[in-house]
Amino acid sequence: MTENTDKDLAKQEVDDSDDSSELSERTVIACGFSGPLPPPQVLAQYDEIQAGFADRIVAMAENQALHRQQSEKLAIEAEINDDRRQRRETFIGQILGFILALAIILIAATSIYLNPTWPVGAFSTLIGGGGIYGIIYAFRYTRQVESVDKTKPKAQ
C-alpha cells in the first residue's frame, strides 16, 4: 500500500481533470515578530529605504518604554497614597468612635450615680452597654475588613 501526500493527490486531481493544465505550486512564507522592535534584519531593511529610519524606530520604542515605566510608577505611587489615606481615615475613625463610646459610658455612669432609681439605672445601663458594644464592634469590624482586604488580590 502506498502513501499519497497532499501534493500527489492534488497532482492526480489536476491530471484527471485536464491533461493539458499544469500543476502549479505556491510557497507562502510568513514571518512575524512581537515586541516593540523588529528583528535586526528588518531594521536594516528600513535603513535601506531611508537613512535614519531604524534609529527613529528604536527611539520610538525607547520613548514608549519610558512612558510605560513612568505610568506604572505613577500608578504604584497612587495606590500607596490611597492605602495610606485609607489607613489614616480608619485610625481617625477608631479614635473618634472610642472617644464617643467613652463619652456615652461616662454619661451613663454619671446618670446612674446621680439618680440611682430603677428606670434611670436600667436606661443608663442600656446606654452604657451600647457604648461598650460600639467599641467592641468597631475594633472587630475593622480587623475583619483589613483581613479581607489582605486576602483579596490587587487589580492590575
Image (tube, rainbow, N blue to C red):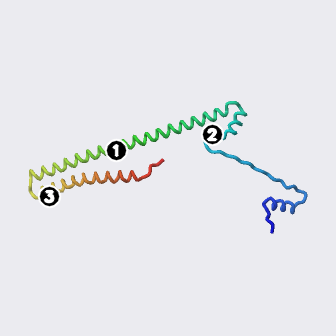
Q: Which residue is drawn at 43% across and 39% down?
A: 77
Q: Residue at x 68, y 37 (%)?
A: 43
SS at mark 2?
loop
Residue assigned mark 1? 87
Between discs 3 and 2, the one toward the N terminus: 2
Report, in whole angstroms, how far the alpha carbon at label 3 lies from the one at label 1: 38 Å
Report, in whole angstroms, how far the alpha carbon at label 2 lies from the one at label 1: 43 Å
Q: Mark 2–mark 1 contact, CB under 8 Å?
A: no
Furthest residue toward right: 20
Whole-percent x and y of residue 61? Answer: 60, 37
Whole-percent x and y of residue 73? Answer: 47, 39
Between discs 2 and 1, the one toward the N terminus: 2
In the depicted structure, whether residue 93 falls above or below residue 4: above
Q: Residue at x 54, y 36 (%)?
A: 66
Frontmost residue, 85 versus 36: 36
Q: Nearer the viewer, mark 3 or mark 1?
A: 1
Q: Which of marks 3 and 2 is in front?
A: 2
- For residue 37, which numbered disc appears in the image? 2
SS at mark 1?
helix
Quarter containing the N terminus:
bottom right
Furthest residue toward front: 1
- For residue 122, which numbered disc appears in the image? 3
SS at mark 3?
helix
Q: Left or right: where does residue 94 sit relative to residue 56?
A: left
Whole-percent x and y of residue 19? Answer: 90, 60
Q: Mark 3–mark 2 contact, CB under 8 Å?
A: no
Q: Left or right: where does residue 151 sit relative to residue 109?
A: right
Q: Left or right: where does residue 51 sit relative to residue 106?
A: right
Q: Left or right: where does residue 53 sit relative to residue 132?
A: right
